[in-house]
Image (cartoon, rainbow, N blue to C red):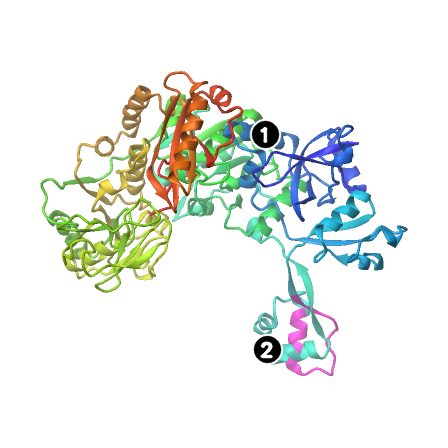
């Protein structure tokens, strides 16, 4: 008998189980006949016992069980007669785990977070088995089928190993109550009752009594009478895919008209692998030209961008994390069982990478976005995985971005630049300007916005009032007791509160300095609240609206074209378009730049270019209050030359052998006791020094923020090719502190969003 290698969505490698006792059924045999020589088990979802509960995994391989059959437990049941993943999908999953130096289960959990549904579990003693084999507490299993909840898992495992437990497991799919007719209208009904029942017969069903009453033009009491008299009744009906989510996508045919203009596909050179520049609609025209070539998987860094694109591609299938897990499973069911129609286009976030269909091209939009970096689990950077899947499938991989990433520039893929208009940029040198946090020159710009009854966006790096609170006399700072970070000042009235944005620690702002008793405090680093206060004094005629991830004011007046100011964090990038936007102001541009990260400059450069297209048709003035007007990112905008910035940045990376010149892995060790974390980092470094060459190992060193949420953090960095890193990572010794592996790190601070 062959054993199953089952991958569970856990940070583990696949585990071995014997096949389920239950027969695979005629549907599975029919599927095997259609598909050819592949095992009917490979790629299927299977329910297995794991630590006292039932978990759902994927069969990723088979192995000989001759030498360990007596030590293996049986899987309980398959959930479908067909596989969720094809052999090529499983191969991609295995290769991705190797590239990410992560257990296969971690990658599976990242790419299929909706894998495990609620289960209906019933069991009974196998018919014909003597009841004497039943341990105490399981006697009811001899009486017939029982619900699986409430039984001792260890005793159930005992019966499974003996082969005397029969189990039925199936996916529990949510249902809804619908109103259906049971009788035809007769003379016993009133005129309104007959009208309501005739309407129900015509509709076939109704979502509720209120919905039927509205359709028939009668009161809800009339419909309730139909139910009470037996003319209609509620029945269970399974949830269905909404019309807009059907996977039977068709080729892009008629070009949709958006904002009164047809989205004409943009002709592209056949060898183009990297498309950059242009405004948003121009890049969508380029995408339209790509998807017309055949089935295409298009990946987006965020759901907001996907939704912004979707109206231009009405026949495409959206697939993303804002769809319910049940809906995502249904889409997966349909594609796995029926496939995607020829010419189908899928617009997806990273969760579409394992959809079991065969695209002719994979397109990644805005491939440099940090939103592609998973913050937990395998910590994958999704464009790397998308390129890996395209390479394994032998299909083209194309990036479409306003600003290409350094990785794209380094790989020298065939590029095609779209026309790029020079942005309107105004640099306010804060070494010469007066006024803080709003300079006099910035106030003049805002007053022009007010006079012309236009709109402006004011963008800051942090929420709250200020980044820290310090005493002006003794330099005391309010610090978090659990993090090596200052407490952020949030003002509620005059006193306010101090809050750590990482661990949530909160305390009242002191009226006097705890160290010297001074009454004079000095806030540093303006936040949203400080800017709202300063703008009220500078331009009182302009209404102000707040927009952060936590607090979003109602924007209906702004969306209707009324003048005003939208003040917030980078959440504004995902806000609706302001129709009269004329100015984008960054009062403290360095707040987005000062970061302990070699990617900080590239990230800042990308942000500035994103701000230039906050409006799809206009070019709002981008005003930056900065202490470094000659920064390369500023010169890039002035010269409308994003490629020039990338070339200069690559020179710096080459000098340091930093990504993308070499791959990098961050080894992060953390512990609640600083000596334990430090010693663990030193021991791991000593082990690696015996393997590495000069320049391949950096550290150990305390993290840029050495204490976060009560944990002391130390970093080691490894540099090299993928093959070389795989050699160095082989057989790492167990560490006394928590070890987290971050391949291709995009952040070294490890903080939550500020």
Q: Position of residue 29 (x, y in %)?
A: 79, 37
Say whether residue 426 is left or right of residue 497. left
Residue farthest top in this picture? 693
Q: Position of residue 540 (x, y in %)?
A: 17, 61
Q: CA distance from mark 2 to mark 1?
A: 57 Å
Say whether residue 77 is left or right of residue 267. right
Say whether residue 1 is left or right of residue 248. right
Mark 1, residues whose alpha carbon is within 10 Å: few (<14), some, or many (≥20)? some
- Tell me if residue 182 is in the magenta stretch: yes
Say whether residue 307 is left or right of residue 438. right
Indicate the secondary structure of the residue bearing disc 2: helix
Q: Position of residue 105 (x, y in %)?
A: 58, 37
Tell me which residue sits at (82%, 44%) in the image: 163
Q: Position of residue 692 (x, y in %)?
A: 43, 18
Tell me which residue sits at (57%, 50%) in the image: 325
- In this picture, is 533 found above or below 47? below
What's drawn in magenta, residue-wise? 178-200
- In this picture, is 531 found above or below 408? below
- In this picture, is 455 found above or below 266? below
Indicate the secondary structure of the residue bearing disc 1: helix
Q: Residue 94 got which mark? A: 1
Residue 389 in view: yes
Q: Residue 220 got which mark? A: 2
């Amino acid at each position: 008998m062959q054993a199953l290698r089952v991958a569970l969505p856990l940070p583990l490698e696949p585990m071995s189980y014997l096949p389920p006792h239950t027969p695979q059924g005629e549907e599975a045999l029919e599927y095997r006949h259609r598909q050819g020589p592949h095992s009917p088990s490979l790629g299927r979802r299977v329910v297995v016992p794991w630590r006292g509960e039932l978990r759902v995994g994927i069969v990723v391989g088979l192995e000989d069980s001759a030498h360990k059959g007596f030590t293996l437990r049986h899987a309980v049941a398959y959930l479908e007669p067909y596989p969720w993943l094809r052999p090529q999908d499983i191969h991609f999953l295995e290769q991705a785990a190797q590239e990410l130096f992560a257990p296969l289960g971690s990658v599976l959990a990242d790419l299929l977070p909706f894998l495990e549904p609620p289960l209906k579990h019933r069991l009974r003693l196998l018919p014909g088995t003597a009841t004497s084999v039943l341990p105490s507490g399981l006697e009811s299993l001899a009486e017939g089928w029982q619900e699986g909840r409430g039984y001792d898992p260890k005793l159930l495992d005992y019966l499974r190993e003996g082969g005397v437990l029969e189990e039925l497991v199936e996916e529990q799919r949510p249902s809804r109550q619908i109103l259906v007719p049971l009788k035809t209208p007769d003379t016993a009904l009133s005129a309104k009752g007959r009208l309501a029942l005739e309407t129900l017969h015509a509709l076939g069903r109704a979502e509720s009594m209120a919905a039927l009453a509205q359709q028939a033009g009668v009161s809800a009491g009339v419909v309730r009478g139909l139910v009470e008299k037996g003319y209609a009744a509620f029945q269970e009906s399974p949830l269905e895919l909404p019309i807009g989510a059907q996977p039977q996508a068709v080729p892009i045919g008629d070009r949709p008209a958006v904002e009164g203009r047809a989205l004409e596909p943009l002709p592209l050179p056949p060898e183009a692998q990297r498309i950059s520049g242009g405004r948003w609609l121009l890049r969508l025209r380029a995408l339209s030209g790509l998807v017309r070539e055949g089935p295409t998987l298009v990946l987006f860094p965020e759901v907001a961008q996907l939704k912004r694109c979707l109206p231009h591609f009405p026949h495409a299938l959206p697939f993303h994390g804002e769809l319910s897990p049940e809906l995502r499973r249904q889409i997966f069911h349909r594609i796995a069982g029926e496939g995607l129609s020829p010419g189908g286009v899928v617009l997806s976030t990273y969760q579409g990478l394992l959809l079991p269909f065969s695209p002719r091209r994979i397109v990644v939009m805005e491939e440099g976005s940090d939103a592609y970096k998973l913050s937990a689990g395998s910590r994958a950077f999704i464009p790397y995985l998308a390129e890996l899947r395209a390479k394994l499938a032998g299909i083209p991989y194309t990036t479409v971005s306003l600003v290409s990433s350094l990785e794209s520039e380094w790989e020298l893929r065939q590029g095609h630049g779209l026309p790029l208009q020079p942005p309107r940029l105004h640099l306010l040198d804060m070494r010469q300007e007066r006024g803080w946090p709003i300079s006099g020159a910035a106030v003049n710009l805002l007053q022009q916005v007010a006079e012309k009854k236009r709109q402006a966006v004011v963008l800051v790096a942090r929420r709250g009032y200020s980044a820290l609170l310090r005493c002006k006399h003794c330099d005391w700072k309010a610090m978090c007791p659990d993090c090596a970070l200052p407490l952020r000042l949030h003002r509620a009235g005059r006193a306010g509160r101090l809050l750590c944005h990482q661990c949530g620690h909160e305390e009242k702002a002191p009226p006097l300095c705890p160290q010297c008793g001074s009454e004079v405090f000095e806030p540093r680093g303006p936040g949203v609240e400080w800017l709202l206060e300063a703008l009220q004094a500078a331009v009182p005629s302009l209404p102000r609206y707040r927009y952060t991830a936590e607090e979003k004011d109602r924007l209906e007046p702004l969306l209707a074209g009324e003048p005003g100011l939208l003040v917030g964090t980078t959440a504004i990038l995902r806000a609706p378009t302001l129709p009269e936007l004329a100015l984008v102001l960054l009062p403290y541009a360095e707040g987005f730049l000062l970061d302990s990260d070699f990617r900080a400059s590239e990230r800042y450069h990308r942000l500035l270019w994103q701000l230039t297209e906050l409006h799809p048709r206009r070019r709002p003035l981008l005003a930056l209050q900065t202490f470094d007007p000659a920064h390369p990112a500023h010169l890039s905008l002035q010269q409308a030359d994003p490629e020039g910035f990338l070339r200069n940045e690559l020179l710096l990376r080459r000098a340091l052998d930093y990504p993308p010149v070499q791959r990098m892995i961050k080894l992060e060790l953390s512990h609640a006791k600083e000596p334990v974390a430090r010693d663990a980092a030193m021991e791991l470094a000593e082990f690696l020094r015996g393997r590495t060459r000069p320049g391949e190992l950096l550290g150990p060193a305390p993290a840029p923020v050495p204490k976060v949420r009560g944990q002391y953090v130390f970093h080691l960095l490894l540099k090299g090719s993928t093959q070389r890193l795989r050699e160095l990572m082989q057989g790492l010794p167990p560490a006394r502190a928590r070890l987290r592996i971050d391949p291709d790190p995009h952040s070294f601070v490890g903080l939550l969003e500020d």
